[in-house]
Image: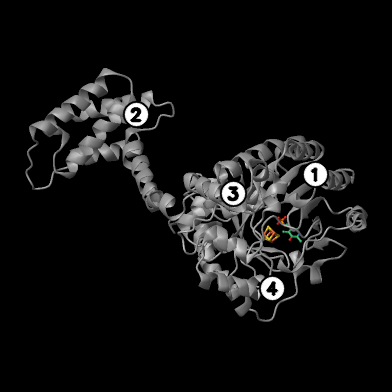
Amino acid sequence: MNTRDKLDYFSHELIDYLYSESDPKVAEPNEEEKEKVRQLLANSLSNNLTGNIVELFKKLKELRRDALSPEVFDISRSQLEELAVKHQEIDEHQVSIGGRVDRALPIVEEAASRVSNYLEQKDVEAPSGIELWDQISANHSRIKQILGMDDKDWNSFSGQLKFAIESLDTLGRILNLPAKALEEVSRVTSNYRMRLTPYYAGLIIPENINDPVLLQSVSTGEMIDNAGIEIPPVAADHSPARLIDQFYPRVVTIKATNMCAMYCTHCLRIAHIGKKDRIYGLEAYEEALDYIKSDTRIRDVLITGGDSFMLPNEMLRRILNELDSIDHVRMKRLGTRIPVTTPQRLNSELLDILEESNDHKPVRVVTQINTAQEITPVSKEAFKQISKRVSSVMNQAVLLKGINDTEVKMWKLCETIHEAYVRPYYIFNCSYRNPQFSHLRVPVEKGRDIVESMYGNISGDAIPRFIATAGGKIPLHRSNVVRAENNELILRKPWSGEEVAYPDAVLDQYEDQDFAFSRLRNA
Ligand SMILES: *Cc1c(COP(=O)(O)O)cnc(C)c1O
Ligand code: SF4
């Protein structure tokens, strides 16, 4: 085979271009350019690296655009063909120079342009709690002092709960909110309960007028003004047994507590978490477990609330043990926001309980993080510890106006939690059932744009599914199957809109059951 024949289509195309007739414009290379080309050529010949050859071809391509062909630099076509072959032979996967310079590199460059705005904006528009840590630490010291907490109080879950901010007065002392704002909040606190742990309150950046952590934890008057006809809570028509909610044949939830360490302004369970903390009697759990025992189709049980980590360790251990002892229950989930709102809850006993149960049957922890700001070095450490003990840690975010309703904010959230050992699982469209927080809702179309913008731009396992809750979880994604023609589908790349043909499986072939070993037996 001669040199030319060893080259692929892409390389021929590239070399043909370099030697094609120049434009009428007569260009003269300057000395600097000549020296540069001489140097690149020498490098390409002197060792066995692909980079030099790529640089040379890139430079020649650039010069050709200025109407300077390689001949101007005394480089012959056969010399370039030999270098092209050399490149292909060095490369472990025989990638040709044409494929690399004319296709792969421009594709990478084009792809990079899709993330340039994000890379510029992400730390400005959506700083994480890790990036804000100095400021958050200062907030923590200030709050600790104002509330009169000592280190022991601060570092314990009981201390965080004991000093939780539940009154307008305390809120005013730690946040220095204007009187008008406090008045607004007071319209709500008389009807709905407010609670922020001192740790979580410290994540609020007071200079931000609509700080996303503040919006999630302190309600404004809209909550009262929006009040319209409230649709009965999910449990009203989906609770077949005490503490149980059920939409699906094989997955049920136990609402094991109505307590949370902080109360969200957008809480879907606002009716359950109600007005006042309640401790449930053992017989309530027994009735719930009896229901699960009696239906052998149930394989996956979610312990939720409220927040499942509000349960004392002993109660969690007991429920997990009971579930592990039911043969048809094969997996468990624990719903909790506490690693984000009050990471002080984690202790070695809790981690041991998780690991022990996970050793029997998989445990997944499902959390709720809505902004990158909620991931601090402390919550990241909490998730790291949890992730070592359970089968997976997943996030269910809620799409909320002003909180995470831009591409930059949502990408940053997904990447930040991904790096904090948490896998993005769902993004919920904010529920229509509770008019109280309709001022936080985002149109579905906007949510679809945001979620779809992630495809092809961030890691696939950091892309959540976009879900509406309406008597079960309904995926809201657009279809990327544009149309079908004969045996071919036309697919749309979500990141560019480009349509590509995708040949489907051949139906006759699919329907032929006599294949693989069966075909051999019958032969
Ligand atoms: C969310 C939820 C589930 C779990 O749904 P997945 O799609 O499996 O995460 C099950 N039951 C109820 C009542 C729920 O609210
Ligand atoms: S943690 Fe969950 S249950 Fe508790 S207030 Fe927030 S959304 Fe509601």
**Left or right position of 312 against 496:** right
- Residue at x 24% of width, y 29% of height: 80
Q: Is residue 477 visible?
A: no
* 4 or 2: tag closer to the N-terminus: 2
* 1 or 2: tag closer to the N-terminus: 2
Query: Where on the image, by quarter, is ligand 2?
Result: bottom right
* 1 or 4: tag closer to the N-terminus: 4
Residue underneath mark 4? 191
Give coordinates of residue 76: x percent, y percent: 17, 28
Residue underneath mark 2? 6
Q: Is residue 197 visible?
A: yes
Tag 2: residue type? Lys
Which labelled disc corresponds to residue 144? Answer: 3
Give coordinates of residue 485: x percent, y percent: 53, 61
Secondary structure beneath disc 3? Answer: helix
Q: Which callout, 1 or 4, points to the residue nearer the camera?
A: 4
* Up-down relation of residue 439 to residue 411 (above or below): below
Q: CA distance from mark 3 to mark 4?
A: 28 Å
Which labelled disc corresponds to residue 482? Answer: none
Please identify the quadrant where the C terminus is shown.
top right
Q: Residues within 10 Å of mark 2 (few under 14, many from 20)?
A: some
- Residue at x 25% of width, y 34% of height: 57
Secondary structure beneath disc 1? Answer: helix
Residue nearest the viewer, comparing 391 with 489:
391
